[in-house]
Image (spheres, helix red, strand yellow):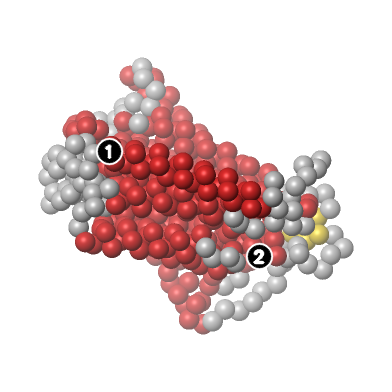
Amino acid sequence: MSRSLRWVVLGVGVAGIGVVLLLAFLGMPDFGSTHHPYRDLAVPAAVRHGTANVVSSVNFDQRAIDTLGEETILFGSVLAVAALLRPADDEEQQQDPGSRVPLQATRLFGYVLMPLTLVVGIDIVVHGHVTPGGGFQGGVVLATGLHLLYVAGRYRSMERLRPMPLVEVSEAAGTAAFAALGFAGIGVTGSFLANVLPPGSFGQLFSAGAVPLFNVAVGLAVASGCVVMLAKFFEQVFLVRNEGDGR
Amino acid sequence: MNIYAYIVAGVLVVLGGVGIARSRDLVHAIVCLSVSQSGTYVLLLAIGFQQGAAAPVFGSTSKPTKNVVDPVVQAMTLTDIVVSATVTALLLALAIQIAKTHGTVDPDELTALEG
Amino acid sequence: MTVLIAIALTLVLAGGVAVVFSRDPQRQAVTLSVYGMLMTLLFFLLAAPDVALSQVVVGTVLVPLMVMLAIRKIRGHR
């Protein structure tokens, strides 16, 4: 198929999709309208279970089965990245990437901001049922906060702070904890992923039943998964070399 | 003017598709896929928006009320953002392996399915 | 539809066009980071703090970092 013919096909496709989308948008309710049936059902259910953050309640209490599916996708993707970026037969993995020294200002920023970011990440995970936040957001903050050490210093220091066997085990542990909480729901009430702990008082740390536990499990799994993914990419760039090749 | 948000979302989705079709570099195509995904996030949030309503988080200063935006679409969107980042990582890992085995990441030159 | 939301939508559209039409993937990673920040602003204006928090971490840091690492690895093989 020649290139100009490809452009014509693309143009026809874009025009077709554009017409269909425009017809759909003209038939939708107005932007900013007051007709939201899902909200009218979800918000009272969240308040009944004592969860101040309704989005966390929807994610981990009312539709926890969807979150289990998403976490499985995340686990599978991390597994696939780790499998794809293994050193092949004709490649070897060095031990020392060599060092470069960044600016003093960068090092100061990195060393000061890294513990702050880690604490903020843990706070976002643990308070996910009270303030905006949760396991997914806090997990990614934790994973990227760890890499501030790479920005501030050397790759070797970050490697020492991040023992790979422990990170890999904790990712599996987070995903398994989510499923185990689901089975605990079966054991107590007979339905998978039911909210089994008492609701508690609205807006406190110990409220919303099992949602904080779900948040911690997801935060652990997401943080460890992202650290594993980034570690494989870093290893490929810095450590893996083709045998007999200078690059 | 009331459907401007939906139109922006639709344009972003189609723009990402056009970017993938005309790209000469697999990494460029992967980033355009990311733009297309973000168009769907804008569409989801625009559907759930209510003019003058608060965020769906209650606390000591905002008592539980029904005048909030739709929390269900927000729950869908936020897990989607994190998970599609990991799928983007998977696609980038595939691109790295293609560069290693075939020496090029130009889609026009990757014509044969070799063993 | 307030003026602020309309401006944010237009900025997001412009950012999307900039990301799709930058040729070099290395430049595209930085543009993608700015686009992530514009999306965060839009999500915040649409009363979605959870989603904005998710987008600011993923779209500004995680994805551009991985894109830059992939480009660095691929360019080394040319």
B106 displayed left or right of B7: right
Of circles 2 and 1, which is in front? 1
Element under disc 1: loop
Q: Which residue is mark 2?
A: C72
Query: Is residue A167 visible to the viewer in this orientation of the structure?
Result: no
Q: Residue at x 50, y 67 (%)?
A: C30
Q: Residue at x 36, y 20 (%)?
A: A191
Apparent side of residue A11 relative to residue C7 in the rendered image (left or right): right
**Which corner quadrant holds the C terminus of chain A?**
bottom right
For mark 1, what is the residue?
Answer: A28
- The outermost residue toward the top is A190
CA–CA distance between discs 2 and 1? Answer: 45 Å
Q: Amino acid at mark 1?
A: Met
Q: Residue B83 in the image: state x and y as whole percent.
A: 48, 44
Q: Which chain is mark 1 on? A: A
Q: Residue visible at 36% across and 17% down?
A: A190
Q: Position of residue A221 (x, y in %)?
A: 49, 43
Q: Is disc 2 placed on a helix, strand or loop?
A: helix
Chain for disc number 2: C
Task: State the image quarter where residue B79 is shown.
Answer: top left
Residue C29 located left or right of residue B24: left
Do tags 2 and 1 sit on the same chain?
no
- Could you say where residue B101 lies in the image, as x and y percent from the top left? 78, 51
Please state which amino acid type lies under the numbered disc 2: Arg
Q: Where C38 sits versus B29, above or below?
A: below
Residue B44 x %, y % = 34, 43
> Nearest the camera: B1 or A70?
B1
Label 2: how many Cα within 10 Å (few below 14, some 14–19, many 20+)? some
Q: Compared with residue A184, is residue C61 higher up or lower down, i.e. above or below?
A: below
Q: Residue at x 41, y 29 (%)?
A: A65
Q: Are marks 2 and 1 in contact (CB under 8 Å)?
A: no
The reply, left or right, for residue A89 in relation to residue B62 is right
